Image: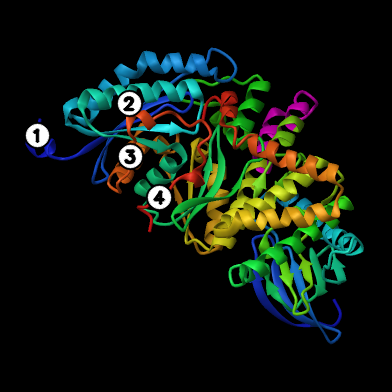
Amino acid sequence: MDEVNQWRLIKKGAEAWLYLANWHGRKVVIKKRLPKHYRTPKLDERIRTYRTVHEPQLMHEAKRAGVPTPIIYLVDVKEAMIVMEFIEGDQVKKLLDLISQEERDRLCYDIGELIGKLHKNGIIHGDLTTSNMIRTADGKIFFIDFGLGEKIDEVEAKGVDLHLMKRALQSTHFKFADECFNAVIRGYSSVLDRETVEEVLEKIKEIERRGRYVIERKEARSSF
Amino acid sequence: MDKGRAEKKYCLGIESTADDFGVGIASFEGEILANIIDAYVPPEGGIHPREAARHHADVAGKVVEKALKKAEIKLEDITLIAFSQGPGLGPCLRTGATVARALASYLHVPLVGVNHCVAHIEIGRLTTGARDPLTLYVSGGNTIVAAFDSGRYRVFGETLDIALGNCLDVFAREAGLRPKTGKPLGAIVEELAGKGKVFVSLPYTVKGMDLSFSGLLTAAINMLGKGVSLEDLCYSLQETAFSMVTEVTERALAHTEKREVLLTGGVAANKRLQEMVKFIAEEHDAKFCVVPSEFAIDNGAMIAWAGVLAFTHGITTPIEESFVKLRWRLEEVEVPWMK
């Protein structure tokens, strides 16, 4: 690991620890997936390796699809570590509660447009929350944390992805969740063709009717 | 009959969302005086809602009587009737609601409809002393990660398809395992898993803070009788499924920054799951709380206690509004007792 120095822990996330560091004179973020001792070592290694390999690949593909993501400088699979560009800006999670309705509408529209670009290229983010989006001073929105993402061009996956966005808005920004999600959908619709959008929206409805929402699923339960 | 007791206020709670018919009695001060559960055990397979409802109707009178006897009070001492109004199986819910309406009318006391998921959290807070926890509620019908924020319990993560307990149950039945008295299928899987040594790879599906167990279940069933021992398969299934819920719980914990983690629901009795959730709670300096099993499974005491909380905060359910709500979501419910 040459020339990575001045490590400073900035966030103990649930899945990885993030450090701010210096790499060849650049300000970088180091994402390190530490072993999780609650899970069996074989499963732990499988999860950490898989995510460390796939996350940079997806970020690269996202960038090609026109969605800003940090530049990847280095991947160390053995250490389950990714060195990437530090993005200076505001987390959308914090921003959303501070801006005017008009600005919020615009921001959510832009987010929807970016999600649309991902989906158009068969990229599923896998964890669309406002914590995973950063707006820079020049108005660009960066998507981060592709650790749960996948490359898959299916309506089901797109539906779940957008459904997660909706759920994140409902749990964290419940005061204006509906208006925000509507704006996201408008932005999304501007990128994808009408047929796909309708399929995805129908899928979201279906997901909401499924399992956890359709409690009749309990029919299959027994001993608990 | 002791005189001091007669002046106290009591709530009788009826639980009938699925296979258990439960009656609990709670005082307005939060003492649980009775918690009687009569479970419907299907002759084979899963629950048939109509059969379960018939069972509930058959045992209702007897269970109410038993609860009153256990609490050492008379029916006339009851000042409030609570029932689980949803979510759950229609026929089962309707049976409980009918009993509740009849009792409230007969006694001329108020009726209050309680959300089953809220009740699980509230009995957890009452019995463990947790104040404002992040709750992992895992049962045969629900897999929910929730925490309080601005007037309601918000759902941060949940299953996208089947519940964790259902996944374990269906696998167990497919493997030819049968529940024994006092030993549900989940406990039998846990016992076998304890003897497993080799971990086999199974699908691990976490989507944001949501989960999916159906692919895992199918893969585990497909491996039955293919050279992997049942012990190893139970072990691998448990490890994979529990790692998934633990990961999601940890995400929600990091996100909400709550200081307590509450584990409840039927699957909460599993020692391996307790160990895993305790581990992440401690890593985030949060207190780990697990609900005692008689209050973690579906029970009437939790309905009685949630009824007391609602009633003492001005909530009642007039009979004409006491229809059951099969898909009543946790975050639809105002919880004014949490400020």
Task: Report if residue B183 is visible in the image.
Answer: yes
Indicate the chain on which mark 2 is placed.
B
The kind of secondary structure element at disc 2 is helix
Q: Quadrant of the C terminus of chain B?
A: bottom left
Q: CA distance from mark 2 to mark 4?
A: 22 Å
Residue at 17 percent across and 31 percent down: it is B77
Q: Is residue B239 magenta?
A: yes
Q: Residue B335: give its label.
A: 4
- Earlier along the polypeptide chain: callout 3 or callout 4? 3
Residue at 33 percent across and 22 percent down: it is B99
Which amino acid does the dot numbered 3 rest on? Gly
- Residue B246 pos. (x, y %): 61, 50
Which amino acid does the dot numbered 1 rest on? Asp
Which amino acid does the dot numbered 4 rest on? Val
Q: Residue furthest front?
A: A102
Residue position marked by numbered label 3 in the rendering: B307
- Earlier along the polypeptide chain: callout 2 or callout 1? 1
Q: Quadrant of residue A68?
A: bottom right
Q: Nearer the viewer, mark 3 or mark 1?
A: 3
In the rendered view, tell whether residue A196 sits above or below residue B88: below
Indicate the chain on which mark 4 is placed.
B
Residue at 21 percent across and 26 percent down: it is B107
Q: Residues within 10 Å of mark 1 (few under 14, many from 20)?
A: few
In the rendered view, tell whether residue A106 sits above or below residue A153: below
Q: CA distance from mark 3 to mark 4?
A: 11 Å
Q: Would you say A216 lies left or right of A143 here?
A: left
Q: Would you say B131 lies left or right of B107 here?
A: right
The kind of secondary structure element at disc 3 is helix
Q: Are marks 3 and 1 in contact (CB under 8 Å)?
A: no
Residue position marked by numbered label 1 in the rendering: B2
Which amino acid does the dot numbered 2 rest on? Ala
